[in-house]
Amino acid sequence: MNSKKVLISLATVVAVAAGIIGISSSSHNNSVSTTPVPVADTPTISKTNATQKYKDGSYTATGSYRSPGGIDNVGVTVTLKKDIVTNVSITPMPHDSTSSTYQHLFLGGYQSLVVGKSIDSIKLGAVSGSSLTGIGFNDAITQIKAQARI
């Protein structure tokens, strides 16, 4: 029973001393900010994501270009993972039969120039004999980069 009284007395002395120290330090230390600084809630960014410029996912845009027959379009869908194109597809949207021929020529050769590459390095010119479809493709890639930017 005596040990219980000693523990209660000791706890009381510690509590009183802590209160006195707290009052003393707050009255003498007015220049210290009392605004709490969050520590545990601060988000961390892994080194892998720190350099990533685009969100992973699939994006679609329609690129335009001028051909001798008028304005032509090409639909482009790109899947990105860590800024690398992992998949790409094109939907031809020709204005006329000549444009249709060239867009289909482009379809036959563009994928190997795009898949596995950084989206920032993609800038296509003439592909498989189609010199203008690449302009529309590049326009769509520019739009996709704007959509996906982190």
Image (tube, grey):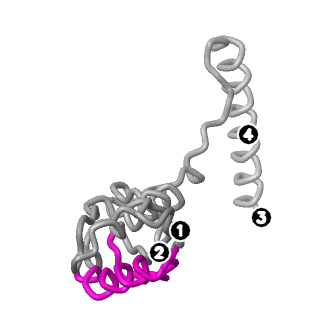
Mark 2 lies on a secondary structure that is strand
Kind of residue at badge 1: Ala
Kind of residue at badge 2: Val
Quickly name the residue at label 3. Answer: 1
Kind of residue at badge 3: Met
Q: Is residue 20 magenta?
A: no
Q: Which range is magenta? A: 84-112
Mark 3 and mark 2 in contact (Cβ < 8 Å)?
no
Residue that appears at 72% across and 47% down = 11
Residue that appears at 77% across and 64% down = 1
Reading the chain from its start, which is encountered first: label 2 or label 1? Answer: 1
Reading the chain from its start, which is encountered first: label 4 or label 2? Answer: 4
Kind of residue at badge 4: Ala
Closer to us: mark 1 or mark 3? Answer: 1
From what the image shows, is residue 131 above or below residue 2? below
**C-alpha separation, residue under disc 1 versus residue under disc 4:** 68 Å
Quickly name the residue at label 1. Answer: 61
Q: Toward the viewer: 7 or 107?
A: 107
Residue that appears at 60% across and 52% down = 41
Q: Is residue 109 magenta?
A: yes
From what the image shows, is residue 44 above or below residue 17? below
Residue 29 picture location, percent across and down: 63, 14
* Left or right of 64 on screen, residue 108: left
Residue 121 picture location, percent across and down: 25, 61
Quickly name the residue at label 4. Answer: 15
**C-alpha separation, residue under disc 4 versus residue under disc 2:** 70 Å
Reading the chain from its start, which is encountered first: label 1 or label 3? Answer: 3
Quarter of the image holding residue 20? top right
Mark 1 lies on a secondary structure that is strand
